[in-house]
Amino acid sequence: MDFSKTWNGSSLRRYSPFCRRFCTLKEINQKLTHSGICTYIGGSAALLEGHRKRMHEKDLPKEVPGPIGPTETRSGFSIPVADRVLRLPPYLFARINKLLYEKRRAGADVIDLGMGNPSDPPQDIVIEKLAAAARDPDNHGYTESRGILNLRREVASKYFKQFGVRLDPESEIIVCLGSKDGFSHLCLALLGPGDTAVVPAPSYPPHVYAVILAGASTISLDVTKPDEFLSRLAFVCQNLFPRPKVVVVNFPHNPTTTVVEADFYHELVRLAKRYSFLVISDLAYADVTFDGYRAPSLLAVPGGRDVGVELTTMSKGYNMAGWRVGFCCGNAEMVRALATVKTYYDYGMFRAIQVAAIVALRHTDAAVEAQAREYQRRRDVLCEGLERLGWPIVRPKATMFVWAKIPEPWASQMSSFDFAMKLLKEADVAVSPGGGFGAAGEGYLRLALVENEHRLRQAVRQIGRCLGQAQSQPPARVAGT
Ligand SMILES: Cc1ncc(COP(=O)(O)O)c(C=O)c1O
């Protein structure tokens, strides 16, 4: 792709109310970015280069190249990879993962709170159904790429039970190979060069790079204060031309754990109608909520399905991350566009998995609730431990993560990458550095609640020892609380 031909590179000038003069789109976007209202990742190679620099290039291991240029094999034959691959930054967790692997190979017992990969198994009846369905010779052929009807019906029942939303399994639900597959193919279905998507910052990386892979640009808006997110979104819609085509929201949010109430979606739908953007709501953590909080659905709000779709998954609450079962529900046109793209990319999910997923959705509600309570207990153990070390902790109301501000004096002495490497090297605890989720995540760590309570206590002790901090006594419990 010739980057100069993307809209950001256009030399056309138009009046910008924000700049109060005629300027090029590039100037408008730079002004928006420098104002601190948002971060822009556009199609131009220079902007991407700047983005790459911000993302701690110095921290990258030598053996992880990126962005990749035309490569030479031993035979001297050069491999010119596609431009879309050049637009991707290097994988920022590579160095941490490499050290984690080396430590484990050398026999160290590393407590891994890095990835949000559930460590508990699915329910026995689900596994038994999978085994039985796998023995049925009829279940081994290609299936419908949008998912078998009975699974889509079961998803409709779950939406009704959980959110009071009635969906048409024929036109408003599609089964995806995990919600990440749904999201990335949806980006291909809705976005292309010249389009812009607003994405949350800090960012779950696919929210940015699936947009970039589709050839479009992103505008990142801080999600940690949802009201401000909405007012900044309105501001961007008023000042950017062309306006954003898609707005990606993700509440409960990975990595910051920010949550919203239903009124957020009322206002989002109002803005979507006013400024004609489409909404993709990533509701991956709908089943992992705490203290009585329930994550609302975009589709439960009047007009929600006029403007958008929602992605849900069986990876988290059902402990089926490796099974790759997700759903995209809502606006029938958007679901149809996704279905069209997917027919060219996959032949549907293994039927035995779909049959077992029906059993999970129909019969394991209690286990999903129990799993959420398990994550809540782990949250309490980890947060209490870190609070005793003096860390400023905000307890999450949802997700399987704790988003922890790095305490002083380390916060002003080192980047989140260096701090995460220190914890891995000296405390045998692996965590995700906030900077891996973009510049907005710098100064934070993400700790996944994927180890049991005993291991989490041990992780806190090891972190305390590594930082030279003795744990203070737990606050005395008041009788009756
Ligand atoms: C916000 C968010 N969306 C989507 C996913 C991916 O879910 P799935 O396993 O359904 O692809 C994750 C996984 O960590 C996530 O954090």
Image: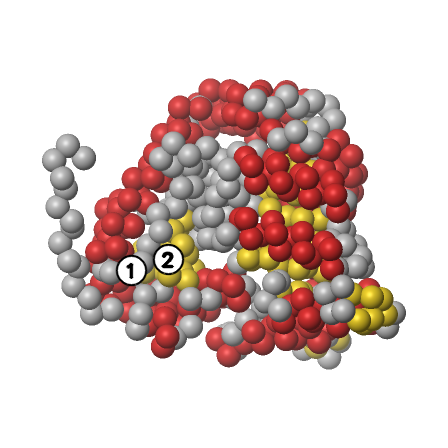
Q: Position of residue 151 (x, y in %)?
A: 62, 24
Point out which mark residue 391 bears.
1
Of 271 and 71, nearer the camera is 271
Q: Position of residue 188 (x, y in %)?
A: 75, 49
Q: Which residue is mark 2?
A: 404
Q: Ligand 1: does it lie within 8 Å of the C-beta at label 1?
A: no
Residue 418 to residue 310: above or below = below
Kindly identify the residue that appears in the image at 56 percent across and 22 percent down. 164
| Left/right of residue 2 with respect to residue 236 in the rendered view | right
Instruction: Give the residue type that dot 1 points to.
Output: Trp
Kindly identify the residue that appears in the image at 12 percent across and 35 percent down. 479
Kindly identify the residue that appears in the image at 75 percent across and 60 percent down. 240
Q: Are marks 2 and 1 in contact (CB under 8 Å)?
A: yes
For label 1, the crowd category at 10 Å Cα-Cα, with few meaning under 14, some 14 to 19 and many 20 or more, is: some
Query: Which of marks 1 and 2 precedes in the sequence?
Result: 1
What's the CA distance linking mark 2 and mark 1?
8 Å
